[in-house]
Image: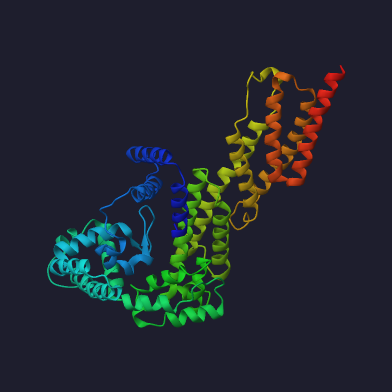
Amino acid sequence: MSQTSIERLRDYLAQLPPQAQALLMREFERALERGQDTAVATLVLDQLRRIVRAAEPDDDAPARSGDPARVLFQPLEPFLVDAGIPIRVGQIRRSSLQPIWQWLGRDGAPDQMREFETALGRLSDEAQVESLARKMQGIAADAIFQLTGPGGGDKSRALARVGPPNVIEDLYSIGAVLQLREAVDALSGRLPRSLRAFGDSQIASVTAALNVPALQTPQMLPFALTMVIQRMTAPWQIIRLAIKMAASDDEIRVAATPFGVAVTIALHDLSCLAAMLRMDIKRGRFDNIGENLKALHDGVRGLRTELDLRNDSAWGKQLTSIRADISNALQSEIDSVPGRVRRILRQRAEKDIPPGARIDTTEVEETVALIDFVATCRNYASELAINEVTLRTYSDLQQYVERSTESLVQSLRAADLKVRTYRQQQMSAAIRFCEVLFGDDYASLMSRAAENALTGERKSSRAG
């Protein structure tokens, strides 16, 4: 799952009223207790707790710039991911920082850490803080490598004191980035600010920026590529760098180069984006569906066309699995839309409509969003393996809504006073559906037809 998607989720949750946030937290906590949907619950809970903590006033809290842990770990910021996101090479769990900070103060470099915190509290000059941070980052890296590097004795007990396995997994990466902080900073300065179309000129520019031996080790190259990806409009295009380095689009030759990890990263990020899409669909959030579908469509198409992937290779199987996951998530939702439309527009006999019956406007708007979702899927149907179901469903919706709208116009002319309000609400829903399926002009035409039907019926009643 990309950082951009997490930021969108955080923005959505932050807009909710405090009562809604509290309700959501309780529901997801219960889901965790029941063992249901744990990945989604963990992710959403983490974001909600961050939002709630940020909203709580804390007069005693130190300024962020004066937070010693934040100053020490600042070089790691581009690579941090929040809880609930599957991690890949070139990334570090944000949750690993606190246990490692505590280990450094307790076992790793306790004397230096105390001196660092004391000195940091006295300094206000930015240049002095920067110099102190660089010195402490080198000390922290040395302490980490002393623990994780080769040496005599069994280090398992000492490693266990750092934290759980996922923290230990991040430990060496944290040390590597801290040790090469200057190289990472230099790369950030050399990279173009924005990589909109990753063509030959920009590939050459990025290749030159990456031409630093320290950044091309198996440990550091994924972090360097992560920095490149963060500047890209279309992150999947990072595979072009690997193809350029291999001078071939053959996956075997690409995989044989150190830059083959770029393909692994692109596939992982596509998989996370597909997971975010499934979560959005499951929660009924369609605001960013079009953008996510386009990113998935372009990424899948790009990997399929620019790389010569074999169906039975690891990369080929992973891409096939991603397409299948996307197709299954989309198809199940697409299949549900006609039923929702029929439930709203179905013309029941007047005797079956109870007094005071009403159409739920919230359900109408949700259905409008779903129809628009189907319309959006048409643009990307072929590459995402949903071509047949999307075209069939959209055609069925057009035919059904057109027939139902015309029938509702006729029913308004003869509707009994007791059910006229309900028929009018059905007609309003049908017009909203027409806006998506046929455009504003047709919807306006049907709206005028409904008004004429009601006017003609009233005139007929007065004449009688």
For the point 66% across and 20% down, which residue is it? Answer: 353
Picture coordinates of residue 417 (x, y %)? 73, 19
For the point 38% across and 56% down, which residue is it? Answer: 86
Residue 300 placement, left or right of 411: left
Task: Name the image colouring.
Answer: rainbow
**In this picture, is 54 found above or below 404?**
below
Please state, as top left, top right, bottom left or bottom right, where the C terminus lies in the image: top right
Depth order, front residue of 458/204: 458
Quadrant of residue 180 in the image?
bottom left
Picture coordinates of residue 284 (x, y %)? 52, 43
Depth order, front residue of 159/126: 126
Residue 429 placement, left or right of 170: right
Picture coordinates of residue 41 (x, y %)? 39, 45
Please state, as top left, top right, bottom left or bottom right, where the N terminus lies in the image: bottom left
For the point 56% across and 79% down, which residue is it? Answer: 200
Examine the rendering and report whether any part of residue 313 can be seen.
no
Residue 142 placement, left or right of 321: left
Quadrant of residue 419 in the image?
top right
Examine the rendering and report whether any part of residue 350 can be seen.
yes
Picture coordinates of residue 425 (x, y %)? 68, 30
Quadrant of residue 226 in the image?
bottom left
